[in-house]
Image: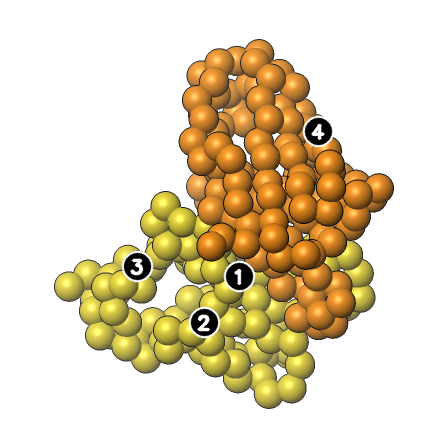
Amino acid sequence: DADVTQTPRNRITKTGKRIMLECSQTKGHDRMYWYRQDPGLGLRLIYYSFDVKDINKGEISDGYSVSRQAQAKFSLSLESAIPNQTALYFCATSDPRLGGRGNEQFFGPGTRLTVL
Amino acid sequence: AQSVTQLDSQVPVFEEAPVELRCNYSSSVSVYLFWYVQYPNQGLQLLLKYLSGSTLVKGINGFEAEFNKSQTSFHLRKPSVHISDTAEYFCAVSIIQGAQKLVFGQGTRLTINP
């Protein structure tokens, strides 16, 4: 059973549409993250959340918004999708109670988003 | 701010040959270091990590990495690769005191040829 799940796994949409990507986890971790992966650029942080009431921007948050509905759920929205948001999106979790190991992040399988 | 540079975007090697994937980082404070692997059409999986202690770290699938503080490097090695090691490999750093954010390198695509 997957500990971090993402839905949908693949999505094709058109410019200007609103899109929501969802992430759920059963690991009981407080911290959740959204990244996008582009070829040659690695993974870049979009948003992160330390708990339901604590949401922070990452390095590339423009054009995105997030919602932390519960400890286990963290959604990423593209209010008006544009073609350069075509990418692979990953959700991840971590647990600060693990001390140094708490910096280790656990990743979902990814959502491949194509904006036409 | 931290940054990570993976010096090779692609590394082709023959099966059973040794391989080294290079990673250099920049940080003004102490960091934890990680290597993640992404197999085709899959998410990221932790390969190994350096938190403290011995600078030679062993991970899964026969990989190891050595932390070199003076050279700010964390190179990944395997003495004999297999076709199944074909994947993209990411080096990442996280500052010890802070928000547990990971900063990733650009990735290195390892291709194993028979």
Q: Are marks 1 and 2 in contact (CB under 8 Å)?
A: yes
Measured as percent of width and height from the top left, residue A107 is found at 54, 52
How far apart are the alpha carbons under marks 1 and 2?
Answer: 9 Å
Q: Earlier in the sequence, mark 2 or mark 3?
A: 2
Q: Which chain does yellow denote in the image?
A: B
Chain A shade: orange
Residue B86: numbered disc: 3
Q: Nearer the viewer, residue A70 or A97?
A: A70
Residues at marks 2 and 3 on the same chain: yes
Task: Check disc 2 and report the residue beneath it.
Answer: B76
What chain does mark 1 sit on?
A: B
Looking at the picture, does residue B36 appear above or below residue A92? below
Instruction: Please state which amino acid type lies under the numbered disc 3.
Output: Thr
Asked if marks 1 and 3 touch (Cβ < 8 Å), the reply is no
Q: CA distance from mark 2 to mark 4?
A: 36 Å
- Residue at numbered disc 1: B91
